[in-house]
Every structure is written in structure tokens, then in C-alpha cells.
Image: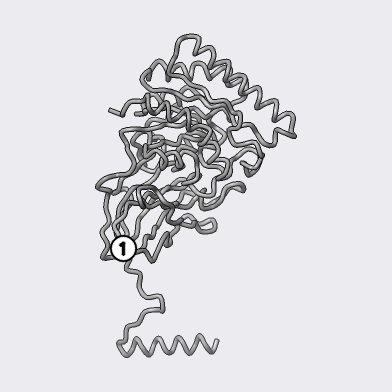
Amino acid sequence: MLIFRIMKNWMIALLLAGTTFTWAHGQDNTRYTDARQFQIVGKGLPTSPVYQRFDSLLDKDLTPAVKHLSKHSSGIAVLFETNSMYIKAKWTLANGLFYNNIVPICHSGLDLYAWQNGKWQWAGVGRPGDKETANSGIIVSNMDGAMRQYMLYLPTYNELTSLEIGVAPEAQLGRPASPKIDTTHRIVIYGSSILQGASASRAGMVYSSILQRKTGWDVVNLGFSGNGKMEFPVAELLVKMPASVFVLDCIPNPSPKEIKERAYPFIKHLLDNRPEVPILLVETVIRENGYFDQKTDQDTKDKNAAIKEAYMKLKSEGYKQLHYLPATNLIGSDHEGTIDGVHLTDLGYMRQLEAMWPQLRQLMKKSHPIR
């Protein structure tokens, strides 16, 4: 109490004397700009609000779960360039709760990459608060002041309601003059919680994001946790999306019965309405917990058998743009690619992309630019 009284009397004396002062850290003169002024990538269609994956006016036929999950900003990133010696951010979320198998930085934080020496290099993260919806902080500091292009990945499992990029007051900040993501070529991926981002360490380590940086193409992440079940209204939305390649990595979520009922009409709708776009159909990843849980093992086998049957039927009908990737060695053979037997670690994501890459590379060669 004595210390508090002394400090209080000292501050009053300074104010009465007309003296101004600042605390030891000084004033923060950072200049913040609404991120919507920069280039937004990773979106299949324009949306309102801008940071969600499906437009609220187009999702009326979707299930409530998919509508909710489509508000999560997984796969969406902001491109900007600046010569600031530091980068900060302020961002607001719809909720502050984390899942027990997802790192908070991936779930609700930000992940920054810089274009350096001809490639994307990780630069820093925005750390969310403990169950806070309003967040702010330094992402990277003490840089050399060179003009660079940056790509900021948004939260994978939360709804972002606002985002501001902060730079030094004298720094330049704007849209990239020569964006390093080619939006005239786009890969649209539809899938499950694995695709959405569970359980990467941060948003940039989801395989769709790794693919984006590897190719320089725009990549759209339509992973819906537990709900990539091939409902027909989703196929109708996919048909409307500009795409050079479609990837269907949604087999983990539907039951074998649902796959038998839904896969054929879902895929056929894409094939018939977008004949110019090659499609890669990916089997469900083999569940690591299925090596001991016999029920899980049989369920995985039944799912892959069901989707293989739909694929063979479509191929027999002459659809040449449909391609297939078995789950064999999709995440390696040492059983170390998951966090919980189902969802992938960074290691698992890297392995899955490596397994997909040979076919993806060939399909990209056959694809056409988006008009």
C-alpha cells in the first residue's frame, strides 16, 4: 500500500506540474490497415463475409454443420508487401475455444511466410490468447527493412471476423505488385477434418497450404471437420468454382453406406458439368488406431472398397478425366504420422502430399488456366 501511495502522489505531482510522460515501453505508433485491402487467396468463390469459405447467400441447401464449418477461414491467406522492420496483427474471432487435438496457433492463430530467395520461407506466428476472441501481437520483428512479399495464413478452426496488419509508421504497405500465387491456376480440394487442418502445428503445415507454396498455384481448402460427406448440394457448389484441378479427399467422413449412395451421383455431377477439369479421387487414409481396433480397421476397408467400386463404375462409363489414389503408404509405414490415430501431424501432412504429388503434377500439366 505504501508503494502504491508513493507512486500515486508522484504521478499527481507530475501532472500538476504540466509534465508529460510515457511508460518504459513507450507509445505504440504502429500503423494498422484492414487486411481486406490486400489480396485474398485460397477462396473458391467470392464470399461475404470475406474470410469465410462459402457465401451465406449460396449455402441455403447445405447442412447446418457444413454451414457452420464453412465460416472457418481454413486455407484462406492474405498477400501483402512491406518494407517494415516488424509486422504485427490484430484479429478478432467468433469464439475462443480450442479443441484438445489441435494446437491453438493452428486453431485460432496466424501463420506468416515471406518470399525470400525465390521461395516461401516461414517468418513467424500470431499467437492467440487463452480463450480470448480479441487478439493482437508481434508476428516478426527486428528485420532488415527490405521490401518483401508476405503471405499470412488465417485460422483453420475458427471464424475470423476482423484482421488488421500492423507495420512501422514510416513503412510502405500494400498489395503485391507481382503476386507469387498464380490465381489463374487453382486446385480445389474437398475433404474432412484432416484437410481442414487437424492436427497441424500451424495453418501453413496443412497439406493444401504446403501444396500452394510448392506450386505457386492458388489452392482452395474445403475441408469440413466430420462433415465432408459428399452431400449433393456441395457438388452443386463445386461445379460453380473456377478450378484447374479438383481433388476429392472426403472419404474419411461418410460411412460405407453413404459412400455407396452418394459417391457416384456426386462425382458424376462434377464430371458431367466440368469435363475440362481433371479430378483426383483419394482413398481414406488408413487409420493408425485400426491396426489394433478391428472395428475401425474393417470400417476403413469397407469405405475404400465402396469408393473404389464407384470409381470403377465411372471409369467403365468412359470418364477419362477421373483419376484414383489408393491409401497405400499415404502417410508412411512407420505409424508415426498422426496425433491420435486419425488426424495428421506435420510429418503426416508432408507424407500425404509426397504421396499425392506424382499424380497431381501430371494432372496439373493437363489442366487449363482459369478464364
- Identity, as a three-letter code, of the amino acid under mark 1: Gly
In the displayed structure, 149 sits above or below 145; it is above
Q: Position of residue 140 (x, y in %)?
A: 41, 61
Is 334 positioned to the left or the right of 17 in the image?
A: right
Q: x%, y% of residue 122? A: 44, 52
Whole-percent x and y of residue 197? 52, 42
Residue at x 35%, y 33% (from the top left corner): 45
**Position of the N terminus by quadrant:** bottom right
Reading the image, the residue beneath label 1 is 145
Q: How many C-alpha atoms fall within 10 Å of the one at disc 1: few (<14), some, or many (≥20)?
A: few
Q: Residue at x 32, y 38 (%)?
A: 182
* Quarter of image, res 319: top left
Q: Nearer the viewer, residue 339 or 320?
A: 320
Quadrant including the C terminus? top left
Q: Secondary structure at mark 1?
A: loop
Q: Nearer the viewer, residue 30 or 215?
A: 215
By what rule are the colours in the image chosen? one colour
Percent of width and height locating residue 219: 40, 36
Report the residue at 50% width, 13% height from top. 314
Q: Nearer the viewer, residue 69 or 195?
A: 195
Relative to 371, say whether 133 is above or below. Answer: below
How many numbered circles are shown? 1
Q: Is residue 109 left or right of residue 226?
A: left
Which residue is farthest top? 317
Residue 333 lies left or right of residue 261; in this view the side is right
